[in-house]
Amino acid sequence: MDKLLEDWSNWNPMALDYSNNYDDESGQNVVEKAQVPLKPSDMRKIKQTGTANAEYPYLVLSKKIRFISTCSVLNFFGQSHVRSIDFKANSDRLTVFFNDLGSLEAAHCQLEEFPLLLQLQRSRIGGGENAKPMVSAANQLPEPALVPTARGPIDLKSRTIQTSASANMHPEFIVMPIVDSTSYKYGSLLPIRDVEKRYKSVKFEHNLERHGAYILEKQYEEEMLTKPLIEELRFGRKFLKNTDVDDVDEDDNEWIDMSGYEKCVACNGYTSTVCKICDMPFCDAYCWSIVSQQHDSKCGSGQKVDINDENFKQLIPKSGLPSKNSMVTITAFEQSHIVYVRPADFLSELAYYRVLAEIRKHGKDVPKLAQLPVCGQMVLYKFEGQVVRAMVLNVDNPKDICVVSVDFGSVEYTDPGNLYQCSSYLSELPRYAVPVKLRGVPRRAITPTLRDVMYAMQGSSTTFKLRYHRHEYDHKNKMQIAVLWCMEENRNINSLLKKVITPVEPALNEPGINENFLPHVAEPPGKNIYLIVTDNSFLKYGIIYCTPVKLGVEITKMQLAFQDYGENIAKAVTYAPPKGQLCVAKYMGKWCRGVSIELVGDGYPSILFLDYGNIVPTHVTDIRAYPQQLTYPVLTTEYVLIGVPEILTDAQVKRLENHFALGAYVSCDEIVKNEENNYSLRFDDLQNILLLPNY
């Protein structure tokens, strides 16, 4: 085996002549000794070339099934792995040439998994007179040419792209809880409003949507309307708003008044149903039950029916968890596995919309909050012409207050100027939206696909049967564990969400996914902007990787999905992604997202970890194919520091690394973007940092 390893190290299909010398080392702690290279983004654009006489590993195979075409063999091993196939007509033998040793090992694994299609006759790691074949025993596959657990030396001499000199741990960004134990003390109203401390487990999963990473609005035109409407997808619910709300509302009211419709005395909704004796308008049986007692005593007397708040509250059904096997409607998704539902039976629907109507009626002329609210305070939250009841959860940032809409369940951050006073009458009206935990659905950061599925499941017209057992109650988070069943499609909604969330490992014959498959979200150009440093291993070349402060925690959130995929889902023993293709690779024991930027045939492709910025030679046994379900945007950007000299001393590099430490919050004076979509950072004190003797 040692001899084989020596042979492999001598073979290099993509070798180029360089005068630089490197120290050969094993593992990920690689020390380079090279001239100053181009920056990584430019290096990836260099066309990879090889010599005409380069030798490639190959397998000599015999067909066990007669009618196997070269196209079938190509798909069997994967188009990204096979370089060429030699095949003679009317022959059962063929020779398959592979791009590198990683592809050769992947082919061995494929043969072991499907032994009834092809039989291995001979395997060589390269052509030429000195190459020694490995011949298999009868009816047995030989030991793979590359042992998966064996790690040879890293070939640094043949690499054209610089790897990270330092092996730093990836920074983790702590997700601060919205509500903690201290939120229930020091004058907070949460002990009164949230007796069970349910909101200690509340999460906000819509930062990407909130900050523009996902599209918030979709415009479309309705045939029956003269002006287009906007479907606003907003943090767990959707509603329609007109692009010219004020003018249309005024025109609509005038048209309704002229049409003969009147406002219901109970809910102020427009109706054409009136009493034939006194012309009192009412909507339906529910509104009639509210006003019937007064109407009977005043009908025909000329006196008007006057419904006060107490009459209204007495007639509204109580709230709470809907009964088992009852029909419910989704009002909001708090997380991927936590959903708010409300009863969908006739009386509960009427009661729910009557509560919303009361909130709109009493919220028209209420004053704004005179001072910042406290945790647990009930307020009216106005946005885009809507008025909802909300409870304040967090006021750590006085300009960005966190509230939860108690009638929907959605958590939102808003400016205090959108908050208004809420009367005790409105505060005490029932809350029909109740959280339930979906059985079997894992918690994951929300992808665009999952988000679209969530919004498609919401709306008053979509109902589900709520199934649960009382003993399946999450006492820690104060929620019932349940299953939602769609009666129309006869399917389990929990299974649908789990399927959308769970990535599927691509087959070896499937084409890989390129880097441009993922959207890139960068901090827009501007001045005086805060960023978080995610990698500083290329500071000696004036390059740094950063992410927006407001999105740093999202990087840590999405790593949970990559870790689960690498540990529990991906089963391939080895994978060597072609240049420019996405992958999931292990770095310091953790699976992260990356892109292959160079293959040199030593079994260690150079992987750029997209969410951080470091470039590391990673063994093929620590790489997995990228699943198309993980569509999280790339939030980390490569920046060039303006004003950094071409040659830096070791002391100056150390000063830069201390100032731009991993995970540090840095305030840049300006972000500049050029026509080639490359970003630069300007720091006015950069020269002072470089000149400080004891920084």
Image (cartoon, helix red, strand yellow):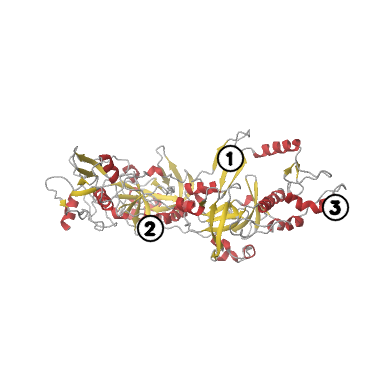
Marks 2/3: CA distance?
71 Å
In the image, taking residue 7 as reference, residue 416 lies left or right, namely: right
Asked if the residues shown at circle 2 and circle 3 are in contact, with their CB atoms under 8 angstroms apart, the answer is: no
Q: Residue at x 21, y 55 (%)?
A: 143
Q: Dot 2 lies on which element?
A: helix
Q: Mark 2: which amino acid?
A: Asn
Q: Nearer the viewer, mark 2 or mark 3?
A: 3
Q: Which residue is drawn at 48% across and 53% down?
A: 495
Q: Dot 1 lies on which element?
A: strand
Report the disc number at residue 230: 1
Mark 1 crowdedness (10 Å alpha carbons): few <14, some 14-19, many ≥20: some
Quadrant assignment for the N terminus:
bottom left
For this rendering, which residue is in front, 431 or 401?
431
If you read the primary sequence from the N terminus, does the residue marked by circle 3 or circle 1 appear first? Answer: 1
The residue at which mark 2 appears reads as 568
The residue at which mark 3 appears reads as 297
- In percent of width and height, residue 525 lies at 47, 43
In the image, taking residue 114 as reference, residue 627 lies left or right, namely: right
- In percent of width and height, residue 402 lies at 58, 55
Q: Nearer the viewer, mark 3 or mark 1?
A: 3
Q: Mark 3: which amino acid?
A: Ser
